Amino acid sequence: MGVRSLTAASGAVMLGFLACMPHLHGAEPQVYVIEINKLAFGPAPAELHVNGIVEWRNSDIFRHTATADDRSFDIDLLPGAKGQTVLKRPGVIDYTCRFHPGMKGRLVVAP
């Protein structure tokens, strides 16, 4: 096998290897959905990770917010609206609705 053939074959193998590793070429962040309905936040997904996106969908007839107790996010949601936040750090984030204080949720974010 000539040097050119060997170089081309090595390059093809390397490209195939890199194609199998999406995190090396900018994979899309995971989007996690939480539904709001009947004055309640739906359950948070079991596995949340840093740089993931949480999307709240307000399926209720009332206006709501998803407001972090630590003020890291404050999403205002009219009926039928969607809103997102990017999870920037690991840990527990408790949140409530500013208009309906009995509505509470919790995000547990892994690295």
Image: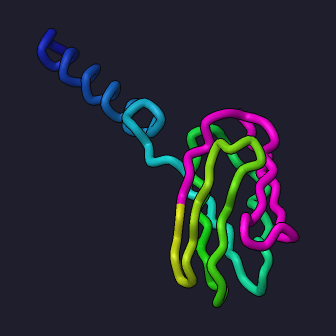
Residue 86 lies, in percent from the top left, at 56, 46
Q: Is residue 76 left or right of residue 107?
A: left
Does the magenta portion include 79?
no
Q: Residue furthest bottom?
A: 61
Of the pair 24 and 29, the residue shown nearer to us: 29
For this orientation, the residue located farthest to the top is: 3
Query: Residue sitting at 79 percent across and 56 percent down?
Result: 46
Would residue 19 be found to the left or right of residue 46 on screen?
left
| Residue in the image at 44% along x and 43% along y | 27
Q: Quadrant of the C terminus?
A: top right
Q: Is residue 8 left or right of residue 10?
A: left
Pinpoint residue 77: horizontal percent, then vertical percent.
57, 71
Rendered residue at 59%/60% (across/down): 75
Q: Quadrant of residue 50?
A: top right
Q: Tell me which corner region of the image, top left, top right, bottom left or bottom right, holds residue 16.
A: top left
Up the image or down, 105 lies above or below 111; here it is: below
Residue numbers of the magenta segment: 84-111
Q: Is residue 88 magenta?
A: yes
Residue 91 locus on image (x, y percent): 79, 36
Colour logic: rainbow
For the point 73% across and 71% down, which residue is it?
99
Question: Residue 33: x percent and y percent?
Answer: 63, 66
Quadrant in which the N terminus is drawn: top left
For residue 18, side relative to residue 108 (left or right): left
Q: Is residue 101 above or below residue 16?
A: below
Compared with 110, 103 (above or below) is below
Which residue is situated farthest in the right direction here? Answer: 102
* 96, above or below 27, in the image: below
**Which residue is at the front of the view, 82 or 29?**
82
